[in-house]
Each structure stands twice: as C-alpha cells, then as structure tokens.
C-alpha cells in the first residue's frame, strides 16, 4: 500500500507530513526511522502526523524525531503543518493540539506564526534530574541556562561569533544532549549576541542532531537572553538556515514567526 505524504521545510528544518492517514504503520518506530533517513528514505528532521480532527479550525498532530521517538514540541514543524492546513482549508488562523498544549497559529503575508505558549523554568518542569539552579547549569566546560518550551533546552552563550562558528558541534552536541542532568535528554543551543544586537544560534536537537533551524530552540534562546539582559523581548534569531522572529509577549507566551515552503508531495510504500 502506498502512503501519501507532504515534504515541507522551515529554514531548512525539514519535515515529512502525513495528513489524516489511518495506517498504523506511520506510528511505527522502525518505519519512522527508515523514512527519516536521507539515504534510505525520504529524509527529514521530524515527522508530523495530522490526526482526525472533526472540529473546524482545531487540529491535532503527533510529532516524531528522526530517531522514531515522539517529541513534545516542534516550532518549525508546527508552522509547516499550519501553513499546509491553512492553504488546504482556505483559512488564515487555526489551533493545533499537541501533547505540550494547544498552539495558536496564523499567517500574515508570507510569515507563518505559532504561539509556543509559556516557557517553564522550574527544574522539575524542564526536567532536570536534581534540584539545582536552572539558570546556572554546569555542562562540561560550559554554563547553560535551562528551560522548557514544551521540550527541554539548554542554552549556552559564547563570547563572540568566532568562538561560535569554530565550535565542533558534532563532537560536543551528543555529549551534552545525553548528560545525566537531563532524564529526557535535551536540545542544546549555542548562541552569541552580535554587534547589531541580533542573536546568532547553532543547535543540536535531541534525537535529530545538527539541524539548520530549530523553532523551539530559537524561542528558548530569546527567553534566556532576555532574562540574562542580553536581549530585548523581541529579536531576530539567525540560524544556519535563515532567521526567525521571536517575541516574548506581555502575557508571557512566546511567538515564533518565519517563512515555510512546501518542497513536494509523493507516496511511499510500507
């Protein structure tokens, strides 16, 4: 049986989307790993599954990393799904339900925005494995600001752009992701504030590795920078794949805005 899919990306952070497919195979870990593989499958950072949603403008999705494990939040993936659904159903606003909460999405011109909700700062909410100050977490040679944006993040600020660009993320990322302080592992963001006060960021995503962009990671970086007085509450985050606009609103929720693009549609066998 052939299973239809849509391939989309947000700043090179790419996704396979299944639209209300009843085949249980699409939730199988081995199948997810195979189709996510860039040599033996379609290739993606995450798989997004739109589930049966009978209520208009309220949709439900499941999200999986390329390792086949379910994930709680994916900002760019949510924006891609929102753009696809808004075009399919001829709407400009919708709600997407995920295991991390209800995400409000809208489109203005070519920018697709998702409200990622409120960051969580408590050590048990992130979660960390012990009660320590989440803003000063020792990770190897680094000090990290840890928080949750529906998934765990550790944000590490470096002194300058040269230090950031020369960082061997393939070496340091896997070690920090699986540090014993993170019982559910963690997304690792390295960032620095540029001379024009925008923020440059690189990311190692748990379960996916290096990606060109990470929406929840960009949100976590802006929040951490703001708390540490390194940035205003609205700023541009520059990633390997482009830039995202992050706004930490007065109601304490965080919005994520940027471009998305549909790459192609196709079918894949079981």
Image (cartoon, rainbow, N blue to C red):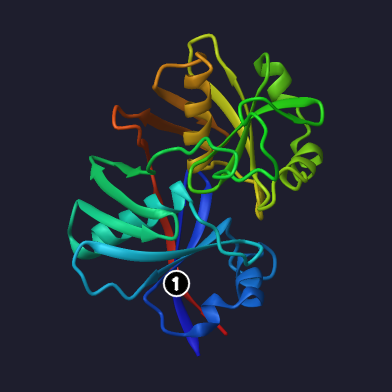
Which of these two is toward me, 253 or 134? Answer: 134
Query: Looking at the image, which residue sits at the far top?
Result: 195
Which of these two is toward me, 210 or 260? Answer: 210
Query: Looking at the image, which residue sits at the far front?
Result: 131
Is residue 2 placed above or below 37 in the rendered structure? below
Give left or right: position of 234 versus 181.
left
Q: Residues within 10 Å of mark 1 (few under 14, many from 20)?
A: some
| Residue 55, quarter of the rendered image | bottom left
Which of these two is toward me, 170 or 97? Answer: 97
Can residue 204 be seen from the camera position used here? no
Give left or right: position of 86 versus 223.
left
| Residue 6, quarter of the rendered image | bottom left
Can residue 217 be seen from the camera position used here? yes
| Residue 56, quarter of the rendered image | bottom left
- The image shows residue 206 at horizontal and vertical percentages of 65, 50
Tell me what residue is drawn at x 60 percent, y 62 percent: 43
- The image shows residue 28 at horizontal and vertical percentages of 59, 78
How many numbered discs, if any? 1
Is residue 41 placed above or below 256 in the rendered structure? below
Query: Looking at the image, which residue sits at the far bottom?
Result: 1
Tell me what residue is drawn at x 69 percent, y 51 percent: 183
In the picture of the structure, the residue carrying the numbered disc 1 is 5
- The image shows residue 164 at horizontal and vertical percentages of 69, 23
- The image shows residue 199 at horizontal and vertical percentages of 52, 22
- The quarter of the picture where the C terminus appears is bottom right
Badge 1 marks a residue whose secondary structure is strand
Tell me what residue is drawn at x 48 percent, y 18 percent: 198
């Amino acid at each position: 049986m052939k299973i239809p899919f849509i391939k989309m990306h947000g700043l090179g952070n790419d996704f396979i989307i299944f639209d209300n497919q009843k085949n249980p195979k699409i939730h199988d870990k081995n199948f997810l790993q195979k189709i996510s593989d860039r040599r033996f499958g379609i290739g993606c950072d995450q798989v997004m599954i739109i589930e049966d949603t009978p209520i208009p403008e309220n949709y439900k999705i499941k999200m999986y990393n390329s390792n086949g494990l379910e994930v709680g939040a994916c900002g760019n993936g949510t924006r891609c799904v929102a753009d696809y659904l808004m075009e399919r159903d001829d709407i400009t606003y919708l709600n997407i339900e995920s295991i991390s909460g209800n995400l409000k999405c809208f489109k203005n011109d070519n920018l697709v925005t998702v409200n990622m909700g409120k960051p969580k700062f408590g050590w048990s909410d992130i979660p960390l494995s012990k009660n320590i100050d989440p803003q000063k977490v020792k990770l190897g040679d680094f000090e990290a600001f840890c928080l949750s944006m529906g998934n765990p993040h550790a944000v590490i600020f470096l002194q300058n752009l040269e230090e950031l660009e020369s960082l061997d993320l393939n070496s340091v990322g896997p070690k920090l992701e699986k540090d014993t302080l993170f019982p559910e592992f963690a997304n690792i963001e390295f960032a620095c504030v540029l001379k024009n006060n925008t923020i440059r960021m690189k990311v190692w995503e748990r379960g996916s590795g290096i990606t060109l962009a990470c929406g929840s990671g960009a949100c976590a970086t802006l929040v951490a920078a703001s708390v540490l007085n390194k940035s205003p509450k609205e700023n541009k985050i520059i990633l390997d794949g482009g830039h995202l606009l992050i706004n930490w609103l007065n109601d304490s929720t965080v919005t994520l805005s940027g471009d998305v693009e549909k790459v192609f549609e196709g079918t894949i066998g079981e």
